[in-house]
Image (cartoon, rainbow, N blue to C red):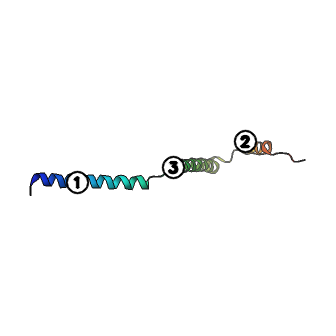
């Protein structure tokens, strides 16, 4: 086989493979809002895990519960 045709075939197959992978990755990658919501969910999950871990091994913090109760009370709208 002629070396020129061999190199042409190899280059053509490489271009086709690169184009196919580019299209596949473009379709399969997460969209920006999905990625951001996933990161926020992961962060909140890590925070909850940290709270649970500290509650199990170090006991619950009463200051946090008082502070959250005060925050809830201050956020309520009085209905008269």
Between 24 and 53, the one nearer to me in the picture:
24
The kind of secondary structure element at disc 1 is helix
Numbered label attached to residue 35: 3
- The residue under the point 24% across, 55% down is 13
For marks 3 and 2 on the same chain, the one whose residue lies earlier in the sequence: 3
- Percent across and percent down for residue 15 are 26, 52
Q: What residue is drawn where x is 64% and y is 49%?
A: 55
Which residue lies most toward the bottom here?
1
- In percent of width and height, residue 73 lies at 80, 44
**Left or right of 72 on screen, residue 80:** right
The residue at the far right in this view is: 80
* Residue that mark 2 sits on: 63
Instruction: Find residue 68 and name its label.
Output: none
Q: Residues within 10 Å of mark 2 (few under 14, many from 20)?
A: few
Earlier in the chain: of badge 3 and badge 1, it is 1
Tell me the residue that label 1 is attached to. Answer: 12
- Residue under the image location 21 percent in, 51 percent down: 11
């Amino acid at each position: 086989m002629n070396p020129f045709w061999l190199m042409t075939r190899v280059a053509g197959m490489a271009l086709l493979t690169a184009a196919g992978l580019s299209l596949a990755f473009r379709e399969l990658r997460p969209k920006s809002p999905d990625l951001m919501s996933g990161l926020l969910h992961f962060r909140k999950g890590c925070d909850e895990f940290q709270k649970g871990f500290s509650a199990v091994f170090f006991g619950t913090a009463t200051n946090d519960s008082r502070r959250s109760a005060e925050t809830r009370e201050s956020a309520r709208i009085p209905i008269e």
